[in-house]
């Protein structure tokens, strides 16, 4: 006997990322035209290797499923400095297949794989100063696609096929943070390097998730909770190493046509190798 089951999960869509990217580009163009004669510009390319960890919870905080595994990526960062301000614009792309360990709608345990695809754009500004602590503010946008792959399970009643599920998330965010410059601590060491600790509070705004079911698709709005970004970087001349961890938290969404997004938490920890092109 064969049955088809749905995974216990949900999804969101990319609705307005191109508009946020256009806003970032417009801000940068205004900045460039205003400081064309006084700005210094730098372009960095980077590769990243990280560990992705997503966990989903029931109302009673019981873990429903977990997706985890390595997540490589690449990107670019543009830095523009005036006499008083530093502007940074970053584009990043990460993708890989990770393990899915969870359960079906009927409560049976189920293991498969999930295709994770993440795109991230951000813009930040900070004053140029010799102070130990430097404040920064920024904005950005995440687009996240989860493709839970189909499979099958064997029970006493026979083989049951499990269809896959596509989920898409998108949200803009506001960032407020601090850069801690540790150069004075390491000034006595040979081969001077720039050491920096970055800590940011991330406030998502109006997260959306689109669930693609076999005969319909539904958009829900999980409650956006604050997250954080923590990094330690070491730079010598054109090479920079960045050790980082970021985390975001989406709380349970309202039920729309019988569909909801459970509470979930995601963390990405890893290493970024950055090379300055000019």
Image: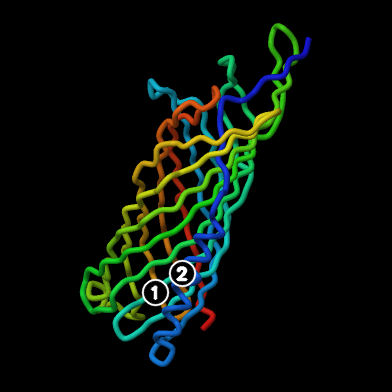
* Residue under pointer 1: 87
Residue in front for this viewpoint, 193 or 263: 263
Q: Which image quadrant for residue 59?
A: top left
Q: How many marks?
A: 2
- 217 relative to 89, above or below: above
Q: Which mark is residue 182?
A: none
Residue at 36% x, 62% y is 232
Q: Which mark is residue 89?
A: 2
Q: Considering the numbered disc 2 on the image, is that residue within a helix, a strand or a loop?
A: strand
In this view, the residue farthest toward the right is 1
In this view, the residue farthest toward the top is 156
**How packed is label 2: few (under 14 Cα within 10 Å), some, or many (20 or more)?**
many
- 99 relative to 96, above or below: above
- 42 relative to 106, above or below: below
Residues at marks 2 and 1, CA–CA distance in whole angstroms: 7 Å
Residue at 56% x, 49% y is 15
Residue at 44% x, 72% y is 27
Q: Position of residue 192 (x, y in %)?
A: 33, 80
Q: Position of residue 182 (x, y in %)?
A: 26, 70
Q: Position of residue 141 (x, y in %)?
A: 47, 55
Q: Considering the numbered disc 1 on the image, is that residue within a helix, a strand or a loop?
A: strand
In this view, the residue farthest toward the bottom is 37
Question: Contact, CB < 8 Å: mark 2 with mark 1?
Answer: yes
- 191 relative to 111, above or below: below
In the image, is 127 to the left or to the right of 255?
A: left
**Is the image coloured rainbow, by chain, by secondary structure, or in one colour?**
rainbow
**How packed is label 1: few (under 14 Cα within 10 Å), some, or many (20 or more)?**
many
Residue in front for this viewpoint, 181 or 177: 177
Q: Position of residue 218 (x, y in %)?
A: 59, 33
In the image, is 98 to the left or to the right of 177?
A: right
Q: Quadrant of the N terminus?
A: top right
């Amino acid at each position: 006997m064969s049955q088809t089951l749905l995974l216990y999960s949900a999804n969101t869509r990319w609705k307005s990322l191109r508009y946020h990217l256009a806003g970032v580009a417009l801000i940068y163009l205004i900045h460039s035209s205003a400081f064309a004669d006084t700005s210094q510009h730098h372009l960095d390319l980077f590769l990243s290797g990280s560990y992705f960890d997503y966990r989903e919870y029931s109302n009673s905080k019981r873990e429903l499923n977990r997706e985890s595994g390595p997540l490589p990526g690449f990107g670019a960062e543009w830095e523009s400095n005036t006499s008083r301000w530093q502007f940074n614009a970053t584009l990043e792309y990460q993708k890989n297949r990770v393990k899915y360990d969870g359960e079906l709608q009927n409560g049976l345990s189920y293991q498969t794989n999930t295709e994770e695809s993440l795109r991230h754009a951000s813009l930040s500004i900070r004053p140029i100063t010799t102070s130990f602590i430097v404040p920064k503010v920024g904005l950005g946008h995440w687009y996240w696609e989860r493709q839970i792959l189909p499979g099958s399970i064997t029970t006493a009643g026979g083989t049951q096929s499990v269809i896959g599920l596509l989920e898409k998330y998108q949200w803009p965010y506001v960032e407020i943070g601090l850069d801690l410059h540790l150069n004075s601590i390491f000034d006595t060491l040979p081969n001077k390097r720039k050491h920096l600790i970055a800590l940011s509070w991330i406030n998502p705004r109006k997260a959306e998730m689109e669930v693609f079911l076999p005969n319909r698709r539904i958009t829900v709005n999980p409650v956006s909770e604050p997250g954080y970004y923590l990094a330690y970087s070491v730079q010598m001349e054109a090479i920079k190493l960045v050790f980082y961890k970021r985390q975001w938290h989406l709380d349970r969404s309202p039920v729309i046509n019988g569909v909801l997004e459970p509470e979930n938490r995601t963390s990405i920890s890893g290493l970024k190798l950055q090379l300055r092109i000019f």
